[in-house]
Amino acid sequence: MMQTKDAEISLNEVSTHDSIDNCWVVLFNNVYDLTAFVNEHPGGAEVLLEHAGRDATLAFQQAGHQTVSESRLEPYKIGQLPTHEWFDVERVFPTKSSSVFTSTPSVLP
Ligand code: HEM
């Protein structure tokens, strides 16, 4: 299947890409193929692999990355989750939402 940056990719599909040579993660409801980036990640391969095939949004936020702009993520974007699978922090974590997502990155929909 041809992947475009607008492709709709489900969590179920993402979950099958969960290894060092096939590493997809979800960040801000977008799907990224980080396979080529795993060994270049300044934070190390292990943290990425811990979230391979999964939603890594909260871990990404909590690891800092304040200096990491959307343009650094863009080359790896291959699609987005269907809207019914979007991670809505207000719903999941109502009391913590404002403190966890203090500075909203521009990649948030
Ligand atoms: C395309 C995606 C990503 C990019 C471009 C990226 C980039 C970076 C960069 C540049 C750093 C160096 C420190 C900084 O500038 O903040 C870093 C550190 C780090 N990253 Fe990532 N990262 C990505 C994804 C992730 C993900 C998905 C996770 C976790 C699930 C993660 C966890 C970490 C951790 C734990 C550090 C170390 C922070 C520290 O040293 O205090 N990163 N990352």
Image: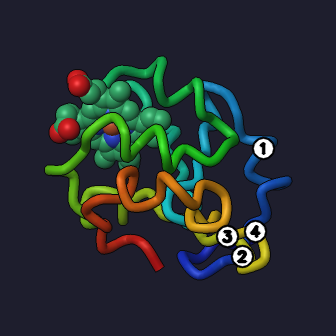
Q: Secondary structure at mark 1?
A: loop
Q: Residues within 10 Å of mark 2 (few under 14, many from 20)?
A: some
**On the picture, is 2 further left or further right than 10?**
left
- Confirm or reject: label 2 Cβ below 8 Å from ligand 1: no
Please tell me the numbered disc located at residue 15: 1
Hey, what amino acid is under mark 2?
Glu
Hey, what amino acid is under mark 3?
Trp
Dot in front, 2 or 4: 4
Disc 3/disc 2 C-alpha distance (Å): 12 Å
Q: Secondary structure at mark 2?
A: loop
Disc 3/disc 4 C-alpha distance (Å): 4 Å
Query: From what the image shows, is residue 87 above or below residue 24?
Result: below
Disc 1/disc 4 C-alpha distance (Å): 13 Å
Hey, what amino acid is under mark 1?
Ser
Q: Could you tell me which residue is drawn at 43 percent across and 31 percent down?
A: 38
Q: Are marks 3 and 4 in contact (CB under 8 Å)?
A: yes
**Residue assigned mark 4:** 85
Disc 2/disc 4 C-alpha distance (Å): 11 Å
Q: Could you tell me which residue is drawn at 43 percent across and 21 percent down?
A: 45
Label 1 vs 4, first from the N-terminus: 1
Q: Secondary structure at mark 3?
A: loop
**Residue assigned mark 2:** 8
Q: Secondary structure at mark 4?
A: helix
Disc 3/disc 1 C-alpha distance (Å): 15 Å
Residue 40 visible at all? no
Q: Are marks 3 and 2 in contact (CB under 8 Å)?
A: no
Disc 1/disc 2 C-alpha distance (Å): 14 Å
**Residue assigned mark 3:** 86
Q: Could you tell me which residue is drawn at 41 percent across and 43 percent down?
A: 60
Dot in front, 3 or 2: 3
